Amino acid sequence: MAVAPQERVLQAFGEAVGTLIDDFDLIDALHRLCARGVELLDVTAVGIMLAGPRGDLQVLAASDERTGLLELFGLQSEEGPCAESYRTGEALVNAGLAAPDAIAHYPVFAERARQAGYATAHALPLRLRQRSIGAIGMLHAGPHTLDSSGVQLGRTLADVATIAVLQQHTIEQGNVERAQVQAALVSRTVIEQAKGVLAERWATGVDEAFDALRGYARRHGERLADVARGIIDGTLDTEALR
Amino acid sequence: MAAVLRTLHPVRSGQGLIGSDPGNCARVLGVDGVALSLLAGERATELVWASEGDSRRLEDLQFTLGEGPGVDAVVRGSLVIEPDLSRLPAGRWPLLLPELTALGTGAVFCFPLLVGRVCLGVLTLQRRASGPLTDAGMDDALILTGALTAVLLDGGAASDALMAVERPSDLYRAAVHQATGMISVQAGIPLSQALLRLRAYAYRHGRPILEVAEDVVARRLDFRNDGPEPDPSGRKRR
């Protein structure tokens, strides 16, 4: 199984991130994601920020682009829940914008957000493996609590945004084609085929064939899929399994 | 939709690759069924998540015939939106369209799971009634496609779920792969040709490929005779 294809994706991503901002389709997709996020999470506003080449956050899209919302999210390139969440890679939820903590950590953003009528902020990092590439932020006009299932939903929306961003890249076939899931599926297929081959050769059932396959793999400390491949390409003498 | 997205990641082992209930997902999207097929190797796909009934049949037909909206979506890496199958030229999918007409499918919508240019699989929505998706349904389908892609890219969790080999196998097309292995020994042909023989047999006899494969595994049918298709006498009941 190839190691960490996402790492290479990430590399490609890092190189191309500067050009993303001009891409209309991506913006449109993210804008609609934000708009839907407002309904799904039951908040007043949602915005998505992406880290530029120098690690500074830029606003990509917000649920309502006609108001000062873009501007408000834009403030967070310096300070704010999104900036913190991006930096730490952790979720920052249920932050009261009038709370001493908020005023201490991001005074400018907290004040401007309160002036715009918001009382609560949440932010979740956009993550690719261990690295954060941006953040999704939510603002609510009143007190608002994201419970654990709300956070889970927020994370899923963050994942969707991450995928949408990645989708814009010309990632060459070789970089992701050995994605683990795909490799696992191929392995599963090969194991089933090997069961069939053994069952036919030995005139037994597929379950007995599988027991023999698994027994051999365990005795020899090999992976099931590798044994199965050996059976199929003829490099493993099937008599050795009996 | 929120509930569907929240439960995508399987929380229990044995829950399969995707945690959400596909039937519920279809209702939310305003269609009759959903199916997620992943690419395994060059062109072969494996069904990993689907609502009961027509969606499975649609995936099986495409697997058997090697053509259809899901195949196109994967090959082109683009959406395939067909809100009215009755208006399509017969040549679009010459083998599949008559089958879909018989099945009563009116509309199909395919969303490839893309990461850059790389396609991991395809999400297919189908409905008996023709007509487009609503705007909200379209947005939700796109969001779901991204969320599914994220689940699949989520490190080892997804592949661990797949590799947990159960007995009997929980792989949807396990019998097809087993039968492929058996046929390759019976007819002395490579696995790829064995699978073609199986698919051709299912198509010629108008039978679901899983059912034919199960007959092979249960030894009610064999491909020992070296003809274009097995001798009918090869189909023996135990």
Image (spheres, coloured by chain):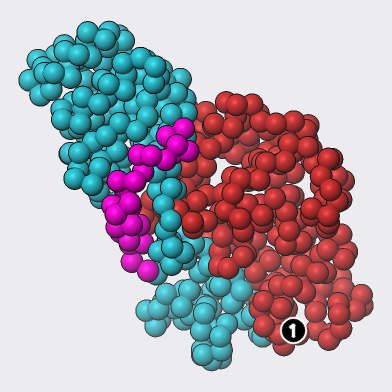
The residue type indicated by label 1 comes to Gln
Residue plotted at (26% across, 20% down): A72
Q: Position of residue A172 (x, y in %)?
A: 43, 63
Q: Residue furthest left?
A: A104
Residue B186 seen from this side: yes
User: Which of B99 and A189 lies nearest the eye of the viewer?
Assistant: B99
Describe residue A181's horizontal placement relative to residue B80 as left or right: left
Q: Position of residue A205 (x, y in %)?
A: 66, 74
In the rendered image of this protein, which colour is used for chain A?
A: cyan
Residue A6 belongs to the span the image colors magenta: yes
Residue plotted at (83% across, 86% down): B226
Q: Chain of mark 1?
A: B
Q: Position of residue B55 (x, y in %)?
A: 70, 45
Q: Quadrant of the C terminus of chain B?
A: bottom right
Describe residue B210's horizontal placement relative to residue B237 as left or right: left
Residue A199 seen from this side: no
User: Which of A85 and A224 lies nearest the eye of the viewer?
Assistant: A85
User: Which of B211 and A94 lies nearest the eye of the viewer?
Assistant: A94
Mark 1, residue position: B186
In the rendered image of this protein, which colour is used for chain B?
A: red
Quarter location, residue A160: top left
Describe residue B42's horizontal placement relative to residue A96 as left or right: right
Q: Main secondary structure of the magenta part?
A: helix
Residue plotted at (51% across, 33% down): B4
Residue plotted at (57% across, 82% down): A232
Q: Start and end of the magenta stretch?
A: A2-28
Q: Does dot 1 land on a helix, a strand or a loop? A: helix
Q: Residues within 10 Å of mark 1 (few under 14, many from 20)?
A: some
Classify A112 as above or below B54. above
